[in-house]
Amino acid sequence: MGRLDGKVAIVTGGARNIGAVYATTLAAEGARVVVADVLDGAPAAQAIRDAGGEAVSVEVDVSREDDTQRMAKTAMDAFGRIDVLVNNAAIYVSIQRRPFHEISAEEWDRVTAVNIKGVFLCAKAVFPHMRDQGGGRIINISSNTVMAGTPNFLHYVASKSALIGMTRSMAREMGSYGIRVNAIAPGLVEHDGQSVPPELSASRVSARSIRRRQTPEDLTGAVLYLAASDSDFVTGQTLVVDGGDILY
Ligand SMILES: NC(=O)c1ccc[n+]([C@@H]2O[C@H](COP(=O)([O-])OP(=O)(O)OC[C@H]3O[C@@H](n4cnc5c(N)ncnc54)[C@H](O)[C@@H]3O)[C@@H](O)[C@H]2O)c1
């Protein structure tokens, strides 16, 4: 018996890196998964099916409303319900860190369109289905750069800050429909998809209470907790999962 047997979960940005780990983890707990990404999510969905799970993929740019509506329709057509939305898609690994005054207005607009508007549009797309079912879970992936005030990343930090406020407002608006909305703020997660300079890695490790590198698997417990009934009375919260780097 999995904790998510009978549930349907959409993972945006689920084609690779941390999102693919979320998708695999939710599937291993019994969820039927929709891998939604601007990249081809078919290999990630196939890997879940190869492991005995159920998954489909859909190509979606989360900053486009038509795409997000198609994402929800794909989930409904394939599985007939939507219980969990993990808003993980973001412009992240491709960002070049630079002083704020060197960030172009165009780059600012693109990062905020995907990282903020994308979360709004995905929530809007799943909401009627969750409301009609009598409940659901939305998990917004923020970042501990918000609490750290990480420099040279202003559009990204602004976008991930917005998600914390949006999580609170969305929780209040959707609570009466049985929809819980929470956020996770990871620390620097090291995986094959991003090259972390050794000095940056070492600085994060030494700042943490738990002195080791953070992996995508360090986040799966938090995602499962917020997706499953264990967190039934928790909403509007941001769970910082960073090995005790930020303590607040
Ligand atoms: N890696 C870290 O250190 C770290 C730390 C804190 C938070 N996060 C957050 O965790 C999440 C995953 O990070 P990651 O390290 O796997 O980075 P990533 O850049 O590989 O993951 C983002 C995913 O979103 C997808 N995506 C990008 N634009 C999209 C769009 N317009 N529509 C749909 N999908 C789109 C990408 O294709 C990718 O699969 C992101 O939200 C990121 O901001 C990462």
Image: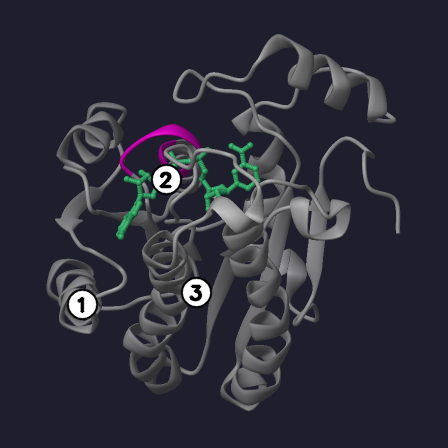
Residue 172 position in % (x across, y down): 61, 85
Residue under label 3: 116
Q: Residue at left 13%, top 58%?
A: 78
Q: Residues within 10 Å of mark 3 (few under 14, many from 20)?
A: many
Residue designated by label 2: 23
Number of residues whose C-alpha sits closer than 10 Å to that of mark 2, classed few (under 14), some (14–19) or many (20 or more): many
In this orientation, which residue lies closer to the viewer: 193 or 83? 193
**Front position among marks 2 and 3:** 3
Foreground tag (1 vs 3): 3
Describe the element under mark 2 as helix, strand or loop.
helix
Name the amino acid type tagged 3: Ile
Residue 184 appears in the figure: yes
Relative to 50, residue 61 above or below: below
- Give the magenta part as a residue range: 15-20
Residue 7 seen from this side: no
**Residue found at the very far front of the displayed protein:** 101
Q: Which comes before the other along the chain, label 2 or label 3?
A: 2
The residues bearing labels 1 and 3 have C-alpha atoms spaced at a distance of: 24 Å
> Badge 1, how many Cα within 10 Å: few under 14, some, many 20+?
some
Q: Which residue is mark 1?
A: 76
Q: Identify the element where label 3 is drawn.
A: helix
Q: Position of residue 143 (x, y in %)?
A: 61, 47
Q: Residue at x 18, y 38 (%)?
A: 41
- Ligand 1 quadrant? top left
Horizontal side of residue 155 vs 130, given as left or right: right
Q: Depth check: 207 or 101 in front? A: 101
Q: Is 89 rendered above or below residue 179?
A: above
Q: CA distance from mark 2 to mark 1?
A: 17 Å
| Above or below for 8 versus 94 | below
Amino acid at pointer 1: Met
